[in-house]
């Protein structure tokens, strides 16, 4: 199957707490490089970080608001639905509680088949911690990993286990990603951005300027819902 005829999907997982312009820049860069729609997948209960400042429904709603005018971006609520329906984990037994990427990708593969080229899009910080993810080596049998890299943040000094695992997987060709269903790793170079959700939440709580880092509809929603502490528009 040629790279032009193989079905292709991009999924961008994250907490999006809150979604900001940097997240949208990552998604839009991937849409441009691969000439494809991007499905943004908010985590229900992220196992690798502290509990989110907003509920899963609130974070998904903010994503809906953020992408209203982004024709190639979509919100995929499968992790939220899996959590509320108590579906079993693909990587283990018993009801699923945390949002494990391997389970999400297993769901995706079950829906779209083995021949589709699937990209799991992550940030560089998340990629550096990949070796701590649940069943992380199984990810490469389910998807390609595309890593959003900000200027000045090279993907070096990786954990030895991760470095060994990905050493032969690197490519810089989008056509290689499109030409096979899974297993490769590619860096996605981004324009210089400064937004970060953690510092954004701190500024909101402290009443410092913040609203210019998110779409206007998201800023309004944060205000109305009184999210992330005391919110003051100082800008």
Image: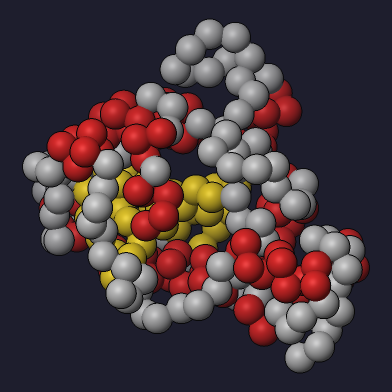
* Whether residue 7 is situated above or below residue 191 in the rendered picture: above
The structure residue drawn at horizontal position 30% and vertical position 39%, both measured from the top left corner, is 143
Nearest the eye: 112 or 161? 161
Q: Which of the 4 quarters of the picture holds residue 196?
A: bottom right
Nearest the eye: 166 or 9? 166
**Figure label count:** 0
Residue 152 as seen in the image, left or right of residue 111: left
Task: List x then y, in percent, for residue 189.
Answer: 29, 70
Residue 84 as seen in the image, left or right of residue 23: right
Task: List x then y, in percent, for residue 219.
Answer: 76, 74
**Rendered-image quadrant of the N terminus:** top left
Task: List x then y, in percent, for residue 183.
Answer: 21, 38
Residue 206 visible? The answer is yes
The structure residue drawn at horizontal position 60% and vertical position 29%, both measured from the top left corner, is 98
Nearest the eye: 180 or 90? 90
Residue 217 visible? The answer is no
């Amino acid at each position: 199957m040629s790279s032009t005829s193989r079905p292709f999907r991009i999924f961008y997982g994250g907490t999006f707490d809150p979604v900001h312009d940097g997240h949208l820049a990552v998604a839009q860069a991937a849409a441009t490089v691969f000439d494809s729609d991007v499905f943004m997948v908010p985590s229900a209960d992220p196992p690798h970080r502290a509990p989110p400042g907003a509920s899963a429904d609130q974070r998904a709603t903010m994503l809906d608001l953020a992408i209203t005018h982004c024709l190639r971006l979509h919100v995929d609520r499968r992790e939220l639905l899996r959590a509320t329906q108590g579906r079993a984990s693909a990587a283990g037994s018993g009801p699923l509680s945390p949002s494990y990427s391997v389970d999400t990708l297993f769901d995706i593969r079950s829906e779209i088949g083995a021949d589709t080229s699937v990209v799991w899009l992550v940030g560089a910080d998340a990629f550096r911690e990949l070796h701590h993810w649940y069943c992380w080596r199984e990810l490469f049998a389910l998807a390609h990993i595309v890593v959003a890299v900000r200027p000045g943040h090279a993907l070096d000094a990786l954990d030895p286990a991760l470095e060994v695992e990905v050493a032969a997987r690197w490519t810089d060709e989008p056509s290689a990603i499109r030409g096979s269903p899974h297993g490769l790793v590619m860096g996605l170079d981004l324009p210089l951005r400064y937004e970060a959700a953690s510092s954004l939440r701190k500024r909101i709580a402290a009443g410092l300027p913040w609203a210019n880092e998110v779409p206007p509809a998201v800023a309004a929603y944060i205000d109305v819902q009184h999210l992330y502490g005391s919110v003051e528009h100082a800008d």
